[in-house]
Amino acid sequence: ALPFGLLVHGNADEKKDTLANRVIDYLIETGSYVPRIERTFVPSPVHRLDRNTTGIVLFGKNAQALRTLSVLFRENAVRRFYTTIVAGTLTGDLHLSGSLARDESQNRSFVLKEGSLQGKRIETIARPLYAGEKYSIAEVELITGRSHQIRAHMQAAGYPLVCDRKYGDAAVNRAAGRKIDCHTQLLHAGRVTLPCVPEPLPRLSGLEVTAAVPLLWKDIQIALFGKEIIPHGHE
């Protein structure tokens, strides 16, 4: 699982300590990847998470596995569930659809009006896990997988992610910041379910992978809700 603050791939500021490099080191140590034999392939992530989003990232250990899983992700056949804390009282399921436009210069996505012929189609389902007076915990399922989809879609629906500086509500974030260390979105990729997987990975068919929310969620939940509702894992 991707811990808070760790990049999947390197950037100009950090090129060595990344999730990809940690996975490669682990596979070399366990003998699952031997660079001198696999000269034309490097184990790679099948999908990505937004910066500062924590949780599950699937990797392909060999070229066949990477190709197979990548096709399933492109076809939106893999079910992906995220845990998040949003502003507002979410008491019922939300089934959201629409279109998403992207402004690369701002690294920002925009939900377009219903019926727009522009942008890419998006579909998101949000289910309340706990509804408080000011904040709620939700499990969000990505039906489609677009950049910043959850953050933009929930904001457009009136339930912005708490502490999300790019898509969140400034007043909500200021209020939350008086209780918690509020600098980035509270979003965790906690559950992934694979469909019927073809060769060479049929043994993975129906597999569900889970990861508990990070340790830092404990104090956040106590500050916002008065108790820990979603059990945390250990980092």
Image (tube, rainbow, N blue to C red):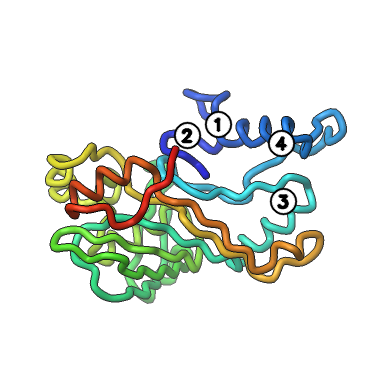
Q: Distance of mark 3 from mark 4, alpha carbons?
A: 15 Å
The residue beneath circle 3 is 66
Q: Earlier in the sequence, mark 1 or mark 2?
A: 2
Q: State the separation of the CA atoms marked 1 and 2.
A: 6 Å
- Amino acid type assigned to the residue bearing label 4 in the image: Leu
Q: Are marks 1 and 2 in contact (CB under 8 Å)?
A: yes
Q: Is mark 2 on a helix, strand or loop?
A: loop
Whichever of callouts 3 and 4 sits on the residue coming sooner in the sequence is 4
Cα gap from disc 1 to disc 4, whole angstroms = 14 Å
Residue 171 versus residue 5 in the image, above or below: below
Task: Name the residue rendered at 54%, 66% in the picture.
Answer: 79
Residue 200 in which image quadrant: bottom right
Residue beneath the point at 37% across and 72% down: 96
Label ID, residue 18: 1
The circle on residue 78 is none
Residue identified by numbered label 2: 6
Quarter of the figure with the C terminus: top left
| Coordinates of residue 35 in the picture (x, y in percent) | 80, 30
Query: Mark 1 and mark 3: span between their CA atoms?
Result: 19 Å
Q: Nearer the viewer, residue 167 or 37?
A: 37
Q: Mark 4 points at which residue?
A: 27
Name the kind of residue labelled 1 in the image. Thr
Q: For residue 126, what is the image quadrant?
A: bottom left
